[in-house]
């Protein structure tokens, strides 16, 4: 397999949800949440996904992780259809694709010591080997000390907790990390540290990263290629700088406009 083959790819993926009936005898309306999505990520590549709330970003991650089966199209892992795999191949896929969620305070169990939380993915995925050695290796990768293992989530700051959540996602030795708004719950002063950590992991471990955010400038800092979603479609794909300087789709223009309004507002404050 050539280096250019994506680790993960969506081909013409569509998804619809059936909604509640409006009245007793009315047909159930359907909502098209994903419509003909093509998307991929390669080893050592960070790709971004932006779009307004409700555009389908989180639904797209559910396709990439295989927790939900699309109504149409294909989900490919190393070129193989995820929904046609035998059990061992599917287990390999589940290990290889891991999520980092937005809010580590809700994604980590508050009653569990950090060490137990880190072991949990190895248990649930039935991964053998020297678990303690793996924990130490991953703590080094995310820049946490071993003393973290005995402590509980409430003893950590938001930025440290997000490092723990990233460590947990790294435990099964994945090839792709999917980060859905990983810094939007954090103070701006902490965000850059977590973004730099993700960038380092892509470079040092050759991970593929799918980075999702509302904020185009956060995605631009982290990724080399960005897809813009609107109403379940990818309406534009480009390098972050090109999207900033010459946005073509209306959805991209409004995301760029939002960034500029914030920056102008900040500049205005500085002059007061
Ligand atoms: N299980 C479901 N049943 C019905 N509708 C759903 C379901 N899950 C999501 N939706 C709808 O699908 C659309 C896309 O939702 P999704 O969560 O993927 O958007 P998003 O881009 O991640 O938004 P946000 O930026 O707010 O996180 C929304 O209109 C949402 O209400
Ligand atoms: Mg979402």
Image (tube, rainbow, N blue to C red):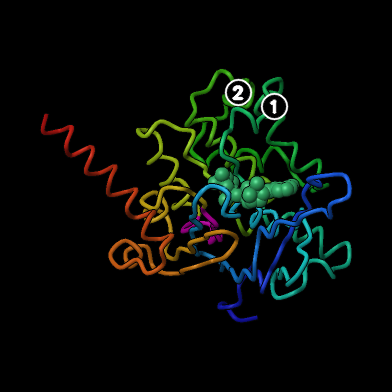
Disc 1 element: loop
| Image x and y of residue 128, in percent | 80, 47
Q: Which residue is labeled 1 in the image?
A: 109
Camera-side residue of 191 and 112: 191
Q: Is residue 137 left or right of residue 81?
A: left
Q: Which residues are magenta?
A: 202-211
Q: Residue at x 61, y 20 (%)?
A: 151
Spatial distance from mark 2 to mark 1, Cα to Cα? 8 Å
Answer few, some or many: residues within 10 Å of disc 2's Cα (few below 14, many 20 plus, some between 14 and 19): many
Camera-side residue of 38 and 94: 38
Q: Which residue is labeled 2 in the image?
A: 153
| Image x and y of residue 61, in percent | 64, 54
Q: Residue at x 51, y 57 (%)?
A: 49
Tell me: residue 9, above or below residue 128. below
Closer to the chain start, of discs 2 and 1, is 1
Q: Are marks 2 and 1 in contact (CB under 8 Å)?
A: yes
Q: Is 209 contained in the magenta span?
A: yes
| Image x and y of residue 47, in percent | 49, 62
């Amino acid at each position: 397999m050539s280096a250019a083959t994506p680790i993960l790819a969506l081909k013409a993926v569509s998804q619809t949800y059936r909604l509640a009936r409006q009245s007793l005898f009315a047909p159930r309306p359907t909502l098209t949440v994903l419509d003909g999505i093509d998307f991929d990520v390669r080893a050592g590549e960070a790709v971004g996904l932006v779009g307004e709330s409700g555009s389908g970003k989180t639904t797209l991650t559910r396709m990439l992780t295989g927790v939900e089966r699309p109504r149409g199209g294909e989900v490919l892992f190393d070129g193989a259809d995820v929904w046609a795999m035998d059990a061992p191949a599917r287990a390999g896929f589940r290990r290889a694709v891991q999520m980092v969620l937005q809010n580590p305070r809700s994604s980590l169990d508050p009653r569990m010591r950090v060490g137990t939380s880190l072991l949990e993915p190895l248990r649930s995925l039935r991964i053998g080997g020297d678990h303690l050695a793996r924990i130490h290796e991953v703590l080094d990768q995310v820049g946490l000390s071993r003393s973290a293992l005995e402590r509980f989530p409430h003893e950590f700051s938001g930025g440290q907790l997000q490092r723990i959540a990233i460590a947990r996602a790294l435990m099964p030795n994945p090839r792709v990390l999917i980060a859905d708004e990983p810094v939007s719950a954090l103070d701006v002063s902490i965000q850059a540290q977590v973004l730099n950590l993700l960038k380092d992991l892509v470079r040092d471990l050759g991970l593929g990263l799918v980075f999702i955010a509302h904020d185009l400038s956060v995605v631009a800092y982290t990724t080399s290629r960005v897809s813009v979603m609107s109403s379940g479609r990818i309406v534009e794909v480009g390098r972050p700088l090109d999207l900033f300087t010459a946005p073509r789709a209306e959805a991209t223009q409004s995301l760029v406009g939002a960034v500029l309004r914030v920056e102008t507002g900040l500049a205005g404050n500085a002059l007061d």
